[in-house]
Image (tube, helix red, strand yellow):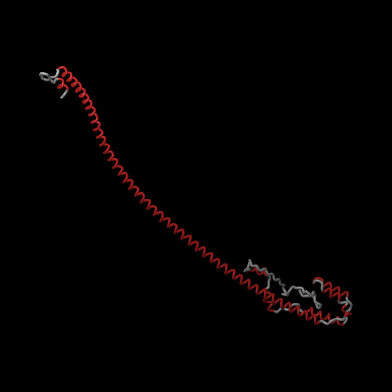
Amino acid sequence: MDLQEIKNKKFEKSAFGYKTDEVEDFLEEVALWAKKQDNENKELEGKLNILVNRIEEYRRDEDTLRDALISAQRIASSIQQEAKNKAEEILRTAEQEKEEILGSARQESMQILTAAKREAEQMHEEAMRQKEETVIQVKHQAEEEEANLVRIQRLVSEFKSQLISIYKEHLNLINKLPEQEKNTQAPEEPKEKADTKPQKESAPAASEQAVASPEPDEETRSSQKEEQVAKKEPTIRVSEAFKKEDMAKTRPVETQQKEKSPFPKSPYKLTITEKDNHTGNYESKFGDLKFGQNKR
């Protein structure tokens, strides 16, 4: 039923029925209401169409978005897979490079250690060789030094023994001299005093005594003859072997070192002097002997 049907509706008349005016007024009101409802329905239908169109658009957009999301998911999955593959490849390459670098470093370190060990062994061997050579040289020098010391001690001992024997011989000769009488001792006192002076003053004192003393008697003449005989005797008797061999070994140490010194830094400093006639240079603690001056 529409608005026109409501307006054109006709009713049959009957006894005791409704009033016609009231029914027509009511129908007009109903027609207005229906018209109003119809307008509202049309408006609602228009809105509904708009909403339906928008829903369709939304559905189309949803499909587009769904397709975009699916495409994005596919792209993201592809990118993730590609990134994962690249990361794995980078890790494999880095691992290989690491192994190569570590292997090269190990090889170089082993070479360096081997070279250092070889050099250290060579230095140790060289040091040990030098040490052994030094020890052998020092031992050889010490043995030669000890041999020289023993030889010098032997020569000194022999010289000392000979010197002591000479002193004993002189003392025996002095003890064998005859004693003079008291009256003959007075002129001899200047000579005895002169004998106690140093060696350099003995000759002038003897000459002065010869001038000042009176004419000697027979005993004095005999004693003077014995003194002259004693002057002719050598002061030091040295064997021919000592003169030729041992005295040749007692040259000054400085001369030997100039020729060839195996001990340039020896702690021993020995100086032995000698003369051409190989006789000792000494002074007696008794001064000049009565039967002659000490030989020099």
Foreground residue, 207 or 165?
165
Foreground residue, 112 or 34?
34
How far across and down, in percent of the image, does residue 152 sit?
Answer: 67, 73
Determine the image quadrant of residue 56. top left
Taking 91 as reference, is 135 above or below it?
Answer: below
Residue drawn 63% across the image and 68% down it: 263
Q: Residue furthest front?
A: 16
Foreground residue, 114 or 55?
55
> Left or right: where does residue 27 sit relative to residue 295?
left
> Left or right: where does residue 84 sit relative to residue 169?
left
How far across and down, in percent of the image, does residue 3 sit?
Answer: 17, 22
Residue drawn 45% across the image and 57% down it: 109
Taking 130 as reference, is 17 above or below it?
Answer: above
> Left or right: where does residue 16 sit relative to residue 293?
left
Taking 223 as reference, is 92 above or below it?
Answer: above
Q: Residue furthest top?
A: 21
> Which quarter shows the C terminus?
bottom right
Determine the image quadrant of residue 142. bottom right
Determine the image quadrant of residue 30. top left
How far across and down, in percent of the image, does residue 190 sit?
Answer: 86, 74
